[in-house]
Image: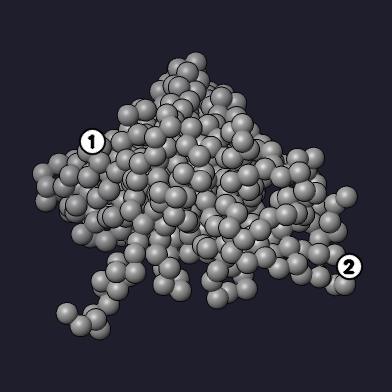
Amino acid sequence: MSNPLAPSWLVTPDDANALPATVWSQNALRSAAGELTIAGVAASALVEQFGTPVYVVDEADVRVRARGIRAAFDRECARVGTTAKVYYAGKAFLSTEVARWVSAEGLNIDVCSGGELAVALAAGVDPARLGYHGNNKSEAEIDRAVGVRVGALVIDSVIEISRVAKAAARHGRVQPVRLRINSGVHASTHEYLATAREDQKFGIALVDAAATVALIRAQPALAFLGLHSHIGSQIFESDGFAEAARRLFALHAQLCAVAPVPELNLGGGFGIAYTSVDQSLAIDELAVRFADIVAAAAAEHDVPVPVIAIEPGRSVIGPSTTTLYTVGTIKDVLVDGTAIRKYVSVDGGMSDNVRPALYAADYSVRLANRVSDAPPALVRIAGKHCESGDIVVRADYLPGDVCPGDIAAIPATGAYGWAMASNYNYLGRPPVVAVIDGVARLIVRGETEADLLARDMGMTQ
């Protein structure tokens, strides 16, 4: 029987131990003893070696998803007479190891800060395969990007045109650029994740775009590649992309009448499943729809089909990662005198996954160290921070005998978990561990108290 406190979308599971395939990484399964294993490594072994919290990345899962996106867009773009440029959006999660994985699988990388650029360069990624975003790139960041010969800089404001042109002239090169357009298309997503609304910080309004492109083309040190659009994140349908393409193509055709425009970048934001009821579009279907959308728009405006550029991040790294926590305290809370909500507190929280607090994002949870035939109980997974809003999983079912010392596993935490982590309440950011073929290795070291104190200038030497 469903708990009346459960949200309407959450169904009481027949088996609170099951791992829905759409939510978990491709190599996550239960061992014969009932323990969660990821790529052949048991959860208890990971906890024993690395502690908790810990982000566990299924390397093969990342590589398969990256390779699949590359293949799907190559195939469908060839079908309509063009090619694809696929950029991994590094803001989702970037380390030197992940940069090497996605690069090896044929993806370019999109960065949006000097730090992300530094990571990609440290990983040995060819700068020509990098795109650089940002609404307020500093002059130093622009100069460095141009100096290392980044493949494309995305201009986000008129002010940036002269800054990039001066840097390019200073380095004696012609810098390829795209122009970020605010299409006005409203993605079906959280308000904070919709990035093409009229009243927001990104891009140039459509009505001002032609004049802005003319300013770019007037700079001999700049080469205009094309328009860029990004309508939001965690999007489950293609209608928004279709409408953005329709609006952009009228401008694209106008610009083609003056000079060739080789590319059109439709951004990323492809959604993934965080719960068993989330229905994301398969990448193969998404590639078909993108290719058809662009081909139809090009035919309508009688212009060549441009190179299609996209920037997936979450859909590459998100499903690959599981965060493991240790259960601490448990409270059965009677709500409105009618039903029990079981609060299960873990040893992390909003410092390692701020999305539930920031976006009211939903996640799933399972016991990792064992299975149980106890009846399912509605749980809320709470963090240890001094905030009532410090919730990791707002609602899911676990076996009712969940107890202190159990290992709780939260799937689909690869995107924006570590990337948005903080030291709130002076918690160190957790380690990131890659697993493949039964072997676990540390790819990002966790922070210690010594790390947290190292920058405190009040410490005596």
Mark-to-mark CA distance, 1 and 2: 60 Å
Quarter of the image with the C terminus is: bottom left
- Identity, as a three-letter code, of the amino acid under mark 2: Thr
427 over 375 or under it: above or below: below
Q: Amino acid at mark 1?
A: Asp
* Other residues around mark 1 within 10 Å, as few (<14) / some (14–19) / many (≥20): some
Earlier along the polypeptide chain: callout 1 or callout 2?
1
Determine crowd level at label 2: few under 14, some 14-19, many 20+ residues with C-alpha closer than 10 A: few
Number of on-image labels: 2
The answer to whether residue 170 is seen in the rendering is: yes
Q: Is residue 453 above or below residue 214?
A: below
- Seen from the viewer's position, the closer of residues 106 and 222 is 106
Which residue lies at the image location 63% right of the left edge and 67% below the top edge?
Answer: 329
Indicate left or right for 217 with 415 as reference: left
The percent coordinates of residue 422 (x first, y second) are: 43, 65
Across and down, in percent, residue 363 comes to 63, 51
Query: In the rendered view, would you say 154 is above or below 237?
Result: below
Q: From the viewer's perspective, is residue 254 above or below residue 393?
A: above
Q: Residue at x 55, y 45 (%)?
A: 412
Q: How is the image coloured?
A: one colour
Query: Viewed as shown, does residue 283 lie left or right of 344?
Result: left
Q: Position of residue 11 (x, y in %)?
A: 79, 46
Q: Which residue is nearer to you in this view: 214 or 271?
A: 271
Q: Which residue is mark 2?
A: 338
Label 1's element? loop
Dot 1 and dot 2 residues touching (CB under 8 Å) = no
Question: Which residue is denoted by mark 1 in the rendering?
Answer: 126
* Residue 403 pos. (x, y %): 66, 58
